[in-house]
Image: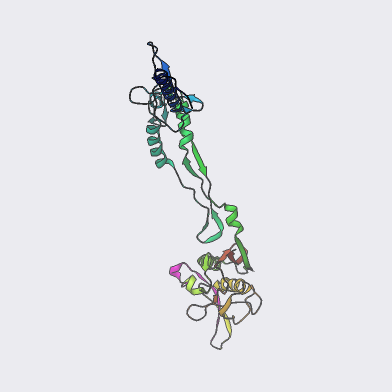
Amino acid sequence: MINFKNKKMKNKTKKLITCILFFLAMFFSGCGMEENEGGIVTPSQTTAYPDNGKSDGTGKNTENGKVSQPPEKDGYLDEINMKIIKDGVLIEDKSFGGLDEVEAVKILNEIAAEKNTEPVEPSYYKKDWLSINEGKTGYQLNVEKTLDKLFSAGKSEKIDAVFDEIEPEKTKEELESQIETVSSFETTILDKKKGRVNNLKLASKAINGTILEPGDTFSFFGTVGETSEENGYEKAPIITKDENGKPKKEDAHGGGICQISSTLYNAAEEAGFKIIERHSHSKDVGYVERGRDAAVNTGSKDLKFINTGNSAVMLKMSVDGEKVKAWVLKKK
């Protein structure tokens, strides 16, 4: 404990302690002190800038190791030095000269709304799973890269917007690989008379591309329709019976279509479908073995079968110069 000998010494000591405490308080408060012309120590006149969360502890804002400059007027230097696109810069017929980023983005959004396209997925033809509609690439404006080009462009320069390609999720090859041939059958065209071949092609075309969902029933005449002259069918030989019940040949509209039904019948049976109606001819037909034919006649004889599988199938048929072909497709 300090022993003060007189009152005067005691007062001087109190003043000294007070000064020391004052300087300590000012030091720990973080306020800078400087000496003015009169030799008086006062708080620093340094302006405290608004804190942007990157202070270095002195009241000055820092970013990337640099102390920010004091604001001018009512704004900051980043506003004063804001990037502006040079005069005369164009994308197509749209002018971007003198615009800042916010203004440029507004126009780029207009371009995107006009030019952006969605990708188109490849798809099967409606009546032919073996033919694929090509997919199409989509395009989307890359705003960031286009802005970079705008701000880098020289005066009166015309530039192209940057678009990113967006590919379809699936390819044509992927769709093709999903199709499987379940069964197929073909017969040789023995009678190539014009009227008969015409009838074969009409019936084949009507059946080609027919889709049967699981449990669906196929009917030959329900699909082909009436084989009349009005529907384009011509007269050609058919097998019928005379008064004594013996087989004979005569011409009728739609003659020859039994080769279509017989070819399809064999493909359907090979596919494992349930045959619920099928008729034999009264004599051999030549294009299939006996017992493998399927006679049809409007109003009396039909060919019917059920898709007993667990997936949809497509019936395909074709007629060329020599063969009638039928096959059954399904998606894996």
- Relative to residue 257, is residue 113 depicted above or below? above
Of 47 and 14, which appears nearest the observer?
14
Residue 76, image x, y percentages? 38, 26
Q: How many marks?
A: 0
Q: Nearer the viewer, residue 148 or 290?
A: 148
Query: Which image quadrant is residue 200 in?
Result: bottom right
Magenta residues span 226-242
**Can residue 139 be seen?**
yes
Q: Identify the colour scheme used.
A: rainbow
Snapshot quadrant of residue 84: top left
Decide whether residue 73 is among the magenta residues: no
Queried whether the magenta region covers residue 235, the answer comes back as yes
> Where, by quadrant of the figure, is residue 61 drawn?
top left
Q: Is residue 43 visible?
A: no
- The quarter of the picture where the C terminus appears is bottom right
Q: Is residue 114 left or right of residue 287?
A: left
Instruction: Identify which residue is drawn at 57% across, 71% down.
Output: 310
Q: Furthest-top residue in view?
A: 37
Q: Nearer the viewer, residue 330 or 283?
A: 330
Q: Residue furthest front?
A: 5
Percent across and percent down for residue 178 are 60, 60
- Give coordinates of residue 187: x percent, y percent: 63, 69
Horizontal placement of 60 versus 236: left or right?
left
Residue furthest to the left in view is: 74
The x, y position of residue 291, in whole percent, is 64, 80
